[in-house]
């Protein structure tokens, strides 16, 4: 495919819409012709070479016949792979933004320490003006299993280690990273779970990881463990969670992602105080820093170089 004359970058995002993204990209890349994906029509469709999107309605990407790159506004690309009309020859790039890694780590550390230090109990007592008996917390008794030791998992591991919280990552293929403990494959997962009282899911959603957070996995943890799911809602078998909490196998769950988002108002998770709910904000994408990555990938794809964050379509992440 040759160079496109006057190429257009198509931008789509849910939430606040594409305008903040278009503005941030123009600030980072003056002169770029960036437009909301859903407003591009007629002959201009053939001028689109890059689509930058979060949850683009299915079928829209297929309208760009000269598309060269599908760039995700997010670390996950499941929302792009889900599109049954996606042009399968077009490479997909996920977002690797150090800002997001820091943000994700802050969120997870907050959830772990809030549980470990019983923050909700002390907030309740303070509201009743009660000065409770002192209570000792021993962070040396924590061991965090990080399912998924990629860009985000590795950042988390280093931060936990700096906080003197023991942790081990779990990957698909064996990894050797200085200063980061890890195991890989199904066989090693069982032993890791057996010694982890916190399990954090930072996996991509793929055919292999769908439903990984289920009764079978919970049963391998020591009783009273904490589950933190910041991967995707599809990782959790929702029907297995409340029974695991009722039996005491899990003592709490911090969930940021759900099978249906927004979480329906009548969902039983809302009214269970053992479940800490956040609305998919663990690591919000940040237009100014993400646009640095997007601008670089636009330059690369237009000059024939390889973009950053390319997804292996066979692995699905
Ligand atoms: P990466 O692609 O960098 O890392 C993925 C990790 O998961 C790798 O270590 C990989 O193993 C491991 N993995 C994949 N499949 C398996 C498997 N079958 N068994 C064991 N390990 C597996 O992703 P990121 O760290 O950038 O992001 C992870 C996910 O976090 C995203 O896909 C997204 O779903 C979620 N996310 C959620 C956000 C939120 O706000 N809630 C924000 C950002 C991301 P290996 O090293 O062997 O390849
Ligand atoms: C992401 C997300 O994948 O925000 O980046 O969930």
Image (cartoon, rainbow, N blue to C red):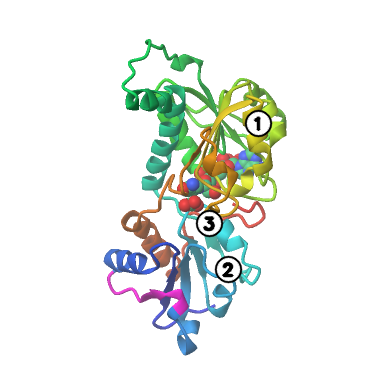
Please provide percent x and percent y for residue 112: 46, 29
Foreground mark, 1 or 3, reads 1
Q: Are marks 2 and 3 in contact (CB under 8 Å)?
A: no
Tell me the residue that label 2 is attached to. Answer: 90
Residue 139 visible in the displayed image: yes
State ligand 1's quadrant: top right
- Cα distance between the residues tagged 2 and 3: 11 Å
Give the mark nearest the N terminus, 1 or 3: 1
Measured along the vertical axis of the image, is residue 96 above or below residue 220? below
Picture residue at 46% right of the left edge, 54% below the top: 95
Tell me the residue that label 3 is attached to. Answer: 310
Picture residue at 54% right of the left edge, 37% below the top: 272
192 lies left or right of 164: right
Q: Quadrant of the N terminus?
A: bottom right
Give the mark nearest the N terminus, 2 or 3: 2
- Cα distance between the residues tagged 2 and 1: 42 Å
Q: Quadrant of residue 169?
A: top right
Residue located farthest toward the front when viewing the structure as drawn = 128
Q: Is mark 2 within 8 Å of ligand 2?
A: no
How many numbered discs? Answer: 3
Q: Nearer the viewer, residue 311 or 114?
A: 114
Q: Are marks 2 and 1 in contact (CB under 8 Å)?
A: no
Tell me the residue that label 1 is attached to. Answer: 244
Q: Are marks 1 and 3 in contact (CB under 8 Å)?
A: no
Please provide percent x and percent y for residue 121: 42, 24
Q: Badge 3: few (under 14), some or many (20 or more) residues near its Cα, within 10 Å?
A: some
Extent of the magenta region = 30-38
């Amino acid at each position: 495919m040759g160079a496109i004359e006057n190429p257009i970058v198509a931008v789509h995002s849910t939430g606040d819409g594409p305008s903040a993204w278009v503005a941030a990209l123009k600030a980072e890349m003056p002169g770029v012709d960036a437009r909301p994906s859903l407003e591009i029509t007629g002959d201009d469709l053939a001028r689109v070479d890059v689509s930058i999107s979060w949850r683009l309605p299915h079928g829209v990407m297929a309208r760009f016949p000269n598309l060269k790159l599908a760039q995700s506004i997010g670390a996950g690309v499941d929302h792009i792979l889900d599109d049954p009309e996606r042009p399968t020859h077009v490479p997909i790039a996920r977002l690797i933004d150090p800002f997001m890694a820091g943000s994700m780590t802050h969120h997870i550390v907050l959830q772990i320490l809030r549980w470990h230090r019983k923050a909700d109990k002390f907030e309740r007592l303070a509201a009743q003006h009660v000065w409770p008996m002192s209570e000792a917390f021993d962070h040396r008794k924590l061991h965090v299993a990080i399912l998924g030791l990629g860009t985000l998992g590795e950042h988390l591991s280093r931060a936990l280690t700096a906080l003197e919280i023991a942790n081990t990552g779990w990957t698909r293929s064996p990894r050797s990273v200085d200063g980061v403990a890890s195991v890989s494959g199904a066989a090693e997962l069982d032993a890791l779970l057996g010694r982890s009282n916190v399990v954090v899911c930072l996996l991509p959603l793929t055919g292999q990881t769908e439903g990984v957070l289920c009764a079978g996995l919970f049963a391998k943890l020591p009783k009273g463990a904490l589950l933190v799911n910041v991967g995707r809602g599809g990782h959790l078998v929702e029907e297995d969670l409340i029974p695991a909490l009722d039996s005491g196998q899990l003592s709490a769950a911090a969930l940021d992602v759900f099978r249906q988002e927004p979480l329906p108002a009548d969902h039983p998770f809302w009214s269970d105080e053992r479940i800490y709910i956040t609305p998919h904000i663990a690591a919000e994408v940040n237009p100014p820093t993400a646009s640095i990555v997007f601008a670089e990938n636009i330059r690369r794809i237009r000059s024939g170089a390889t973009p950053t964050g390319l997804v292996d379509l066979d692995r699905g992440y």
